[in-house]
């Protein structure tokens, strides 16, 4: 009997948690008009174009990675946004999460990245830490779901040590971090990668906190 009631209690607690997650409302991280709540190089790299955080250049090579990051840190969350990257040469970008600013070089960030660009679309990369692609989705799936030279949708969910990524509603990553030393809390940031004449734009950036 005790086992029965314990099981019921656990199921009840789980159902409450799931319901709470389902009923949480998304809040906007970017108002579409100002850099309020964000920090980065807003003089030379980042600007706001058509209500999108936009970094890089189509006429000059981006000299090195640049990030515009939230001032606030986040734990468990679900992040949704739209992105578009264009350009020539090495065209790459990404969305950092559970990340912190590097001190050397100061323009870099350390942490997980939902990667963007040929050969990296919707993969999970570890930026400036392990410096490797942790999960690489199937290329046939990416070819099927990716929209070229237009806006695409991203969803990133991190709960506990589990990370999930979706591109245009198709799941590309489901990863459980085995390294207990890695902290699952930090800033969210948008990247434009150095090395190409590239423009990275992000809009409708919303978050649900758990």
Image (cartoon, rainbow, N blue to C red):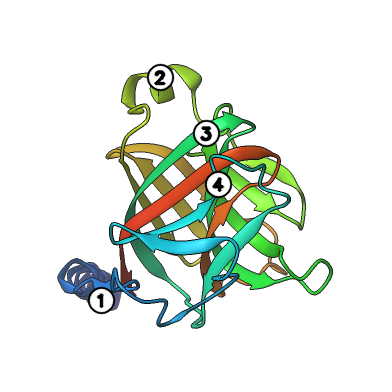
Mark 2 crowdedness (10 Å alpha carbons): few <14, some 14-19, many ≥20: few
Which residue is denoted by mark 2 in the rendering? 143
Q: Earlier in the sequence, mark 4 or mark 3?
A: 4
In the rendered structure, find residue 57 and report the number of the disc placed on it: 4
Label 4 to label 3: alpha-carbon separation: 8 Å
Q: Earlier in the sequence, mark 4 or mark 2?
A: 4
Label 2 to label 1: alpha-carbon separation: 40 Å
Mark 2 and mark 1 residues within 8 Å of each other at the beta carbon? no
Q: Earlier in the sequence, mark 2 or mark 3?
A: 3
Mark 1 crowdedness (10 Å alpha carbons): few <14, some 14-19, many ≥20: few
Mark 4 and mark 1 residues within 8 Å of each other at the beta carbon? no
Which residue is denoted by mark 1 in the rendering? 13
The residue located at (49%, 57%) in the rendering is: 162
Mark 3 crowdedness (10 Å alpha carbons): few <14, some 14-19, many ≥20: some
SS for callout 4: loop
SS for callout 2: helix
Q: Earlier in the sequence, mark 3 or mark 1?
A: 1
- Looking at the rendered image, the quarter that the N terminus falls into is bottom left
Label 4 to label 2: alpha-carbon separation: 26 Å
The residue located at (68%, 46%) in the rendering is: 194
């Amino acid at each position: 009997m005790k086992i029965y009631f314990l099981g019921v209690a656990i199921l009840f607690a789980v159902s409450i948690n799931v319901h709470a997650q389902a009923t949480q409302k998304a809040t906007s991280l970017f108002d579409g008009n100002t850099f309020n709540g964000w920090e980065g190089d807003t003089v030379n790299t980042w600007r706001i174009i058509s209500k999108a955080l936009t970094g890089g250049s189509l006429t000059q090579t981006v000299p090195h990675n640049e990030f515009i990051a939230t001032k606030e840190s986040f734990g468990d969350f679900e992040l949704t946004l739209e992105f578009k990257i264009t350009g020539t040469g090495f065209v790459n970008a990404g969305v950092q999460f559970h990340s912190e600013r590097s001190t050397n070089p100061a323009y870099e960030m350390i942490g997980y990245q939902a990667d963007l660009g040929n050969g990296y679309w919707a993969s999970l990369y570890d930026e400036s830490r392990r410096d490797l692609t942790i999960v690489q989705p199937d290329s046939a799936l990416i070819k099927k779901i990716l929209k070229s030279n237009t806006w695409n949708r991203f969803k990133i969910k991190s709960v506990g040590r589990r990370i999930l990524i979706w591109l245009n509603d198709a799941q590309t990553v489901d990863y459980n971090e085995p390294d207990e030393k890695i902290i699952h809390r930090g800033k969210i940031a948008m990247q434009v990668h150095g090395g190409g004449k590239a423009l990275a734009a992000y809009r409708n950036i919303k978050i649900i906190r758990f």
